[in-house]
Structures are given as C-alpha cells and as structure tokens.
Amino acid sequence: MQVRVRVPAKVNLHLAVGPLRRDGYHELVTVFHAVDLYDELVAAPAERIELAITGDGAGEVPADEHNLAWRAATLLAARTGAPPKVRLEIAKAIPVAGGMAGGSADAAAALVACDRLWRTGLSRTALSELAAELGSDVPFALLGGTAVGTGRGERLIRVKTNAILHWVFALAEQGISTPAAYRELDHLGGGSTTAPDALLEALHHGDIKLIAARLYNDLQAAALSLTPELQRTLDAGRELGALGGVVSGSGPTCAFIAASRDEAARLAAALAAERVCRATRVAAGPVPGALAR
Ligand code: C5P
C-alpha cells in the first residue's frame, strides 16, 4: 500500500506584519490563497523513516531529520504511538525558499499521508494542531482555499470567493530565508497592522481588478532590501500588463495577477523574454489543501 498526496503552494494576498512577540514570532494579519502549483508526496511502508526528494531545487532541501516532512512524520508517530516507519518521496514543484511555503506544504502532505498509511485516523482539527506545532504556514497548507490567518498565521478563518485568480510567478535565482526576511523588516523599522478589509470586500464581490489592486505585503520591503533586483521584476510585470503584483510571502518570488489564463501565459512569456527572473510559472487559485488521492 502507498498513499499519494498532492499539496498546493500559497501566496499571501495580504500580509501585515505586526509587532515582534516575546516568543520570537510576529503577530500577523494575513490572507492566504492556495494555487495549483503542487508538490507531490508518496508515503510507503518502510523499516524506519526514509526520505527522498526530486524535482525543482531538490538539492537545496535537507533529506534528513531536519526536513519538515520528516519532522511531521516523527511528530505524528510520537503523538499517536504509531511506529515511525515510512518512506517519503517528495517531488518538488513549489520553488524552494521562494516565499510560497513549499517546506510547510511538504509537512502538511506528510501529516495527511502518514495519518492514512498508519491508520491513525486523526480529525482535521487534530491534524491542524500538529501542523501549527510544525510551522506557522502548515495549517493553511492543510486547509487550502482562501483564508484569513491571525496569530503567527496558524489561526485560520475561511474566506468565500467566486473569483478565480490567474497568476504568474516569477522565480528568482537566489532564495530568501524566512527568518532573514522578518529580521530585515525589523531592521527597517517593522511592518504594520493594516487590516485586509478592502481586499476582503473585493474577494466577496469576486472583483479581480480590485483584488489585484489591493495586494499588500509588509515583507516586500524586506525582500527588496535583501534582493534589490526584485524591483525590476515587479516593475516589468506591471509594465507588461499585470493587473497587480506583489512579492510572495517572505520572497523572493514575485506574484502577478493576470486578467485571464491566456493573459497569464502571455505575461509569463513576456517576463521570460525580459530576463527579469530565473523562470516563470503560471497557476490559478483558489484550490483545496493537502489531499490524498
Ligand atoms: O513558523 P515557521 O517555522 O515557518 O517560521 C519561520 C521563521 O519565520 C520563524 O522562526 C520567525 O523567525 C519567522 N516568523 C515570524 N513571525 C511569524 C511567522 C514566522 O517572525 N508570524
């Protein structure tokens, strides 16, 4: 028996980074959005925990107990009493250190896969609590869709929207580590507590132009400070006809909303021709979170 799980990348439509808390995290108000750019994880019986990683950026990801998917399997076993025996194979398509929560996605996929393989039968709520222990973005990778996140990002409320968003992601040469982006923002004087009210209204009405105009990310300033070339990428996207653009999460991936699937394909080709990024990806959202298939 083996279990195959597909798990989406995320982009933050809104990311207001509030004050640094005593536990080292920042208080967030964010709007997560899952897109159809997936990592795939296959879990199969083994004598111990084993991990193999293939795909885009696989060489930059630890394939040992430091990997968040490995830690997810260990945590689930410890909490349920299941023997920690599984072979995990991850095929990466979500850019590594790209601000799209690829590591968190793999952890969510490992929770879902091991829960199924080991027949531990945890509820989605119980899985979500384990997810929050593993990382701030892991609960959203389980949930998917579009959701407001508060706390460190782990407290989630679903947002209903009819809008289908067509995205172009411009991938950068070098990744940015999430803690480095938050530290840089603190150096720059910190973020804001800006509420996403106008964005939520635009999502409610399914108004894609307004959604695109209201993309907001406090960490963008930090990403630009660490990787100034991103300004060219953001400018190019807007000049080439994106409805809106923003750095994704802690960066360096730049995310653009296009008017349609065809427009997204055209924009991706134009960005590639301008040589303002390493590669482009076209995607759409929202899509569900980690699912066994
Ligand atoms: O929760 P996660 O392990 O993904 O977070 C990685 C790092 O990002 C944290 O160690 C912290 O430096 C930073 N972070 C933060 N505030 C948050 C989420 C993450 O400062 N709300």
Image (spheres, rainbow, N blue to C red):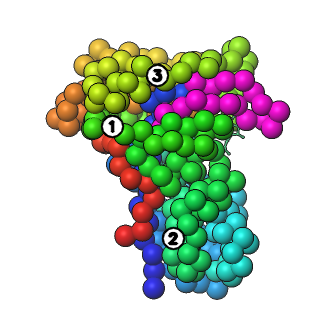
**26 within the magenta span:** yes
Magenta span dominant secondary structure: strand
Query: Mark 2 or 3, which is nearer the eye?
Result: 3
- Checking the image for residue 113, the label placed there is 2
Q: For the residue marked with disc 3, what is the amino acid?
A: Asp
Q: Nearer the viewer, residue 49 or 140?
A: 140
Q: Can you say whether 118 is above or below 110 in the image?
A: below
Question: Label 1, label 3: how many angstroms apart (C-alpha)?
Answer: 14 Å
User: Which residue is identified by label 3?
Assistant: 197
Q: Is mark 2 within 8 Å of ligand 1?
A: no
Q: Residue at x 58, y 70 (%)?
A: 122
Q: Is residue 167 magenta?
A: no
The residues colored magenta run 16-33
- Mark 3, other Cα within 10 Å: few <14 / some 14–19 / many ≥20: few
Q: Where residue 201 sits in the image (x, y, percent)? A: 37, 24
**Eye-nearest disc, 1 or 2:** 1
In the picture, measured across the screen, residue 168 lies left or right of residue 254, that is left
Residue occupied by mark 1: 161
